[in-house]
Amino acid sequence: TISATTLSFLTYDPLAAAAKTGTGQLTVTCTKSVTTPKVGLDNGGHNANATAPATRAMANGTNYLSYDLFTTSGYTTIWNDTTNVVAVSGTLGVKSPQTLTIYGQIPAGQDVVNGSYTDTITATVNF
């Protein structure tokens, strides 16, 4: 099974000089013992509207706010579902949940309309 918490950036300020960050949790539980499964995250439902350097975008109607999800708190490797997947360390035992942290970042300086922006990401576990 896969379960996740909502990754919330809280309030984004387009005038802030620094990027806005947030974290979420992804928990993977297997019904059989599995050695080092890999978890991938897709680019969401609005990635065609992302502006560089980001590869994902959240939507508020027809308005978009670009962001990305990263594999570590260093925000250097974008978590995707092809080359930058995250290996769950060790062996997932029967019904032994493992939690991974997802590190989100909104690049600074995006001039966006005030409102609530959302996106949906699909996680895939490969054994």
Image (spheres, helix red, strand yellow):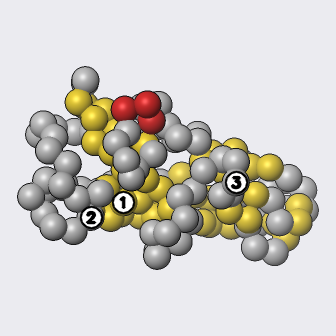
Neighbor class of circle 1 (other Cα within 10 Å; few <14, some 14-19, many 20+) is: some
Instruction: Report the residue at 27% width, 62% height from top.
Output: 20
- The answer to the question of whether label 3 and label 1 lie on touching residues, with beta carbons closer than 8 A, is no
Left or right of residue 5: residue 53: left
Q: Position of residue 106 (x, y in %)?
A: 31, 56
Q: Position of residue 52 (x, y in %)?
A: 37, 47
Quarter holding residue 27: bottom right
Element at label 3: loop
Find residue 62 and report its horizontal and vertical position in percent: 25, 23
x, y percentage for residue 80? 60, 50
| Numbered disc 2: secondary structure | loop
Q: CB of mark 1 within 8 Å of CB of mark 2?
A: yes
Q: Residues within 10 Å of mark 2 (few under 14, many from 20)?
A: some
Q: Give the vertical position of 95 relative to 80 (above or below).
A: below
Residue at (66% x, 47% y) in the render: 81
Q: Could you tell me which secondary element the residue under label 1 belongs to?
A: strand
Sequence order check: which comes first, mark 3 or mark 1?
A: 3
**Which of the labelled discs sits on residue 83, or is there none?**
3
Disc 3 or 2, which lies upstream in sequence? 2
Identify which amino acid the numbered label 3 is placed on. Thr
Q: Nearer the viewer, residue 43 or 27?
A: 43
Amino acid bearing label 2: Ala
Q: Is residue 60 above or below residue 28?
A: above
Which residue in the structure is indicated by mark 2? 19
- Residue highlighted by disc 1: 105
